[in-house]
Image: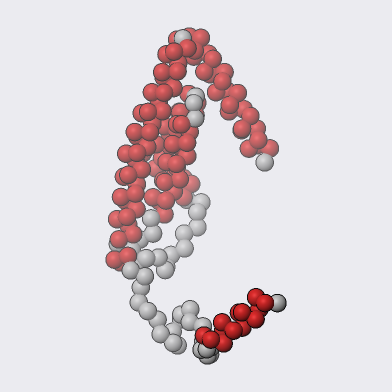
């Protein structure tokens, strides 16, 4: 927890220092323009990368595979987009790092090595939920008995409960 708190204190202070330093060198208006330009370019790149990732995820689901890598990429893209919308050059650099496909694949490859993958189940081909299972097979059927209650008696019971 202290590391996260430190991150929320150190990064904004560093961003302010960097913006002031760059503003002193090139001027206030060019600095503001540069921050806006990185946001616009980043959002265009985010849109393109996001669409590509969604299409790959849909293709994997159609053939019955779990799109785990694409889901992780989606998280990276969302973090990158949030960083790009945050004003500043340091957060923009981190945001662009999340959006560059080669760098993102490298980081994801290293992170996913530490993730345990459970095989089996998943989605069957065609995106269907699989065959129905009957009694005696490994299924989620709960056996029991039931009886229908007369609707009039249920209304009478409800009315008597509301009068109390």
11 or 101, nearer to the observer: 11
Task: Give the vertical position of 119 relative to 107 (above or below).
Answer: below
Task: Give the vertical position of 133 relative to 113 (above or below).
Answer: below
Whole-percent x and y of residue 61? Answer: 33, 59
53 or 87, nearer to the observer: 87
| Image quarter of residue 32 | top left
Residue 7 horizontal side relative to residue 25, left or right:
right
Whole-percent x and y of residue 157? Answer: 61, 83
Residue 68 horizontal side relative to residue 162, left or right:
left
Residue 52 horizontal side relative to residue 84, left or right:
left
Whole-percent x and y of residue 73? Answer: 41, 46
Residue 101 horizontal side relative to residue 23, left or right:
left
Q: How is the image coloured?
A: secondary structure
Q: How many marks?
A: 0
Please state, as top left, top right, bottom left or bottom right, where the C terminus lies in the image: bottom right
Visible in this render: residue 109?
no
Q: Residue at x 44, y 13 (%)?
A: 29
Whole-percent x and y of residue 44? Answer: 34, 33
Q: Residue at x 46, y 80 (%)?
A: 139
The residue at the far front in this view is 163
């Amino acid at each position: 927890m202290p590391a996260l708190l430190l991150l929320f204190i150190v990064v904004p202070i560093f961003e302010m220092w960097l913006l002031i330093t760059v503003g002193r060198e090139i001027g206030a208006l060019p600095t503001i323009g540069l921050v806006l330009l990185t946001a616009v370019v980043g959002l265009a790149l985010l849109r393109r990368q996001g669409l590509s990732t969604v299409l790959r995820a849909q293709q994997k689901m159609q053939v019955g595979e779990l799109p785990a890598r694409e889901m992780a990429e989606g998280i990276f893209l969302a973090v990158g987009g949030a960083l790009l919308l945050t004003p500043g050059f340091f957060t923009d650099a981190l945001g662009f790092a999340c959006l560059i496909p080669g760098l993102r694949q490298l980081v994801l490859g290293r992170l996913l090595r530490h993730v345990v993958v459970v095989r089996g189940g998943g989605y069957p081909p065609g995106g269907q939920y699989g065959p129905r299972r009957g009694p005696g097979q490994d299924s989620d059927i709960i056996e029991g008995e039931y009886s229908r209650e007369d609707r009039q008696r249920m209304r009478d019971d409800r009315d008597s409960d509301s009068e109390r």
